[in-house]
């Protein structure tokens, strides 16, 4: 039987993993798909570069057209990253009738709808399991496992770098800047860590997950993203004392078709399964009307975990080829996107205030909450005995975001409140 | 468009959930599949029975033939349980060209190969996601998510009843018999709990998971099953002290095609994600060569979680109907089954001994381990200060099962060892 020919765009970490898995598991893949799978061409930036994988030199090319324009190639795997020129390459490949597997979250978060439309037009598959949470088959879970259910909430630890940093800060009482530096030295964080630490990477992944989970075209701009660069070791220590771990959570909610998606450092109750997801691991916590609470946990990045998802997508494309159903298995979002207003977004909150140490201050503060109809779960005064400053930690019951903004605005104007040191959403 | 007609065998807990979800999510299901889905007939034992769901009385029948023999019905959902007569009904339905969705673990563990062969012969789908771990889409994860990988280990908390009992014993220091009684009163355990507490239910689920994960026809008889009825609160308390939780784990391992599958109460390191899976929740921990460690967590039973999986399978069948690919998506096991010998099965072990309280006993004991080439990780003498009996807890390094059996046999014959109180496999 004629082998299925695959073109690879990129031979970095994930690309190398893809080559390794296809070589090592060739026999199993053949059993799984009924076809031999051959990597026919690989686009690289520099053919002469030394690599820690041996690849037939004839297969390497520096010209993208050798891959996306080669009529012998059935499937293009895109693991080169980038957005605008990569998008053009993928659109061209689809235009040439090639199926596409991509690990590119930026691309799918920003241009997913356009790419999927082009694929549908040309009867091609586009799969992107690896774009979210590396080796965890979360896209399949949402699309197939929960096809019968209505997803109401998706909470994800979907960025390994920030989870590594927060875990270290929690376990070692270390400061953000020190752990970031260490993570950079270990290769867990980029030289310019902005995209990870400011929550942008997580926002892209949440865009993809919420679009699939809620069947509405969520755009990257719909996601409110806040990162971890302002998280202090004091916040983490206070959180621990009260039974919380700080995690960077993507949170997507859907109530009767009204959607909100955000990324923010969150106080997660220690007993919640997400609280013990540590280090570079990822996890996605999915709540469905019928299925209840579920969690999917695994390696969120890395050569082989991510390549596992890429090659699983490749297997799916080849199976579809054999069945003659490419381009016919994707369900486009069919629900109108209605974003929640601040009045419709509710959560518990953790607030740390530095206040003037005199009688009556707490009464003033609680009165403001009452005025804005925010009820309180607990109030801790002077939580830190060794700190002479008067500190107050307040945990609210579910409060809507509009009321919370009003409360904080009023706090800001009060002389007896020296500083709103930190505000966290609370989950679990 | 003509609706797809479904026949339901059984209207118990899961059947009721299936009817509810199909009614409530009808519009979404139509979007997902391109077809209206109609429950045309429902087999019940007693048509006149009062039910907590209102169903058109015309649809109820006490005659199975009205479902499996009705030429209008495209898909049969089997949620009645039972094995031998149920198997005949399903084979007949398949013979009549009907696709089958079942939640029946007993049936699939015992007769899965025969049923799948019959389905293949008639070009029919048979899906059974709900047969293992209720709402968790673990079968899809193994079959599709990890199609590119080689699964080396599957550890599962796949029985909610026993996990509920062990959780209560751990959290409240309660005795097995008391918690079992409470579980029976709450409806978490059957009047005859044997199948759950002796590990048979878990063994059936592990048969299904290991067959799918390892691509070999694992039979129920290949699974060594041991239940929790001998687990004492003392074992649990000692485990906790040393940093372990006792969990009933199904453990399937695959090294180069050599397979072992077992179910047994296991000491799981507290930091392992499985250790904090509590109550009636289920979780399956899957290790793959490439993907590394992953975990899937959720409700293992219950009306709606289980029905979620049943209806997700129904969606898959209807999608296949639309694509004209029924009966063509299932991969039969293609690897020869080679079971491990005792010499090939290795694990750490936890052993609690009651011994004579005199000098030299520990030396004798450790010598026996050394003689059988079992090395020790740690030894705790008199772990319980308030207990005057001399107790020793030993944790071994990885030791093969044959050596362990020899060690225990020798212990059995020694006068200075009064009792081998307990032996647990150790994981994590």
Image (tube, coloured by chain):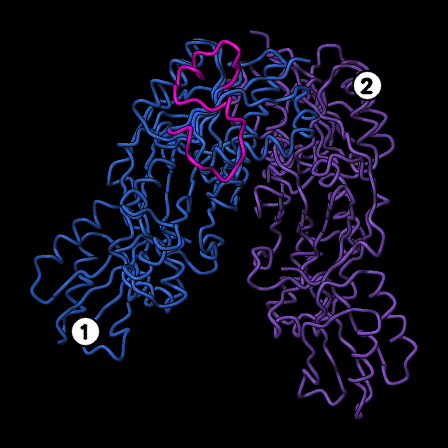
Chain colours: A blue, B purple
Look at the image and say whether residue A52 sits in the magenta stretch.
yes
- Tell me the subunit letter for badge 1: A
Say left or right for B284 vs B337: left
Image location of residue B220, percent across then percent down: 83, 42
Image location of residue B72, percent across then percent down: 71, 10
User: Which range of residues does the magenta coloring cover?
Assistant: A46-75
Judging depth in this view, the residue of A181 and A288 nearest the camera is A181
Instruction: Provide the major secondary structure of the magenta segment.
Output: loop
The quadrant of the rendering that contains the N terminus of chain B is: top right
- At a point 36% along the width and 62% down the height, the residue shown is A169
Q: Label 2 neighbourhood size at 10 Å, few (<14), some (14-19), many (20+)?
A: few
| Label number found at residue B65 | 2
Q: Is residue A14 above or below residue A267?
A: above
- Tell me the subunit letter for badge 2: B
Q: Secondary structure at mark 1?
A: strand
Q: Is residue B231 above or below residue A287?
A: below
Q: Secondary structure at mark 2?
A: helix
> What residue does disc 1 label?
A390
Question: Mark 2 or mark 1, which is nearer to you?
Answer: 1
Where is residue A411, by image quadrant?
A: bottom left
Both labels 2 and 1 in a single chain: no
Look at the image and say whether residue A162 sits in the magenta stretch.
no
Judging depth in this view, the residue of A366 and A352 nearest the camera is A352
């Amino acid at each position: 039987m004629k082998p299925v020919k695959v073109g690879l765009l990129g031979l970095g970490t994930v690309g190398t993993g893809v080559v390794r898995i296809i070589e090592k598991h060739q026999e199993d893949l053949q059993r799984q798909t009924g076809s031999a799978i051959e990597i026919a061409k690989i686009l690289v930036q520099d053919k002469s570069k030394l690599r820690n994988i041996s690849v037939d030199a004839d297969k390497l090319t520096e010209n993208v057209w050798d891959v996306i324009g080669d009529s012998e190639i059935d499937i293009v795997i895109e693991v080169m990253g980038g957005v605008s020129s990569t998008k053009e390459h993928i659109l061209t490949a689809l235009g040439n009738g090639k199926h596409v597997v991509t690990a590119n979250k930026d691309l799918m978060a920003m241009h997913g709808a356009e790419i999927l439309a082009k694929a549908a037009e040309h009867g091609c598959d586009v799969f992107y399991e690896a774009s979210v949470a590396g080796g965890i088959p979360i896209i399949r879970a949402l699309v197939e496992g929960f096809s019968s259910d209505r997803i109401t909430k998706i909470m994800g630890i979907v960025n390994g770098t920030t989870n590594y940093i927060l875990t270290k800060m929690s376990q070692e009482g270390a400061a953000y800047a020190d752990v970031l530096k260490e993570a950079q030295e270990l290769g867990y964080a980029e030289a310019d860590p902005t995209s990870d630490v400011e929550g942008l990477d997580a926002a892209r992944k949440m865009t993809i997950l919420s679009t699939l989970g809620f069947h509405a075209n969520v755009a990257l701009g719909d996601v409110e993203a806040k990162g971890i660069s302002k998280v202090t070791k004091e916040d983490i220590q206070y959180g621990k004392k009260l039974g919380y771990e700080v995690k960077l959570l993507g949170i997507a909610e859907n109530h009767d078709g009204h959607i909100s998606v955000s990324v923010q450092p969150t106080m997660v109750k220690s007993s919640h399964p997400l609280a013990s997801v540590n280090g570079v691991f990822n996890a996605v916590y999915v709540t469905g009307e019928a299925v209840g609470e579920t969690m999917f946990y695994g390696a969120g990045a890395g050569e082989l975990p991510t390549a596992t998802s890429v090659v699983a997508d490749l297997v799916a494309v080849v199976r579809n080829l054999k069945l003659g159903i490419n381009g016919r298995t994707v369900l486009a979002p069919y629900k109108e996107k209605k974003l929640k207003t601040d009045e419709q977004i509710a959560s518990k909150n953790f607030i740390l205030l530095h206040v003037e140490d005199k009688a009556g201050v707490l009464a003033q503060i609680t009165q403001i909450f009452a005025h804005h109809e925010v009820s309180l779960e607990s109030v801790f005064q002077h939580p830190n005995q060794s700190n002479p400053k008067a500190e107050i930690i307040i945990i609210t019951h579910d409060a809507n975001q509009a009321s919370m903004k009003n409360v904080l605005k009023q706090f800001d104007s009060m002389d007896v409140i020296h500083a709103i040191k930190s505000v966290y959403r609370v989950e679990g």
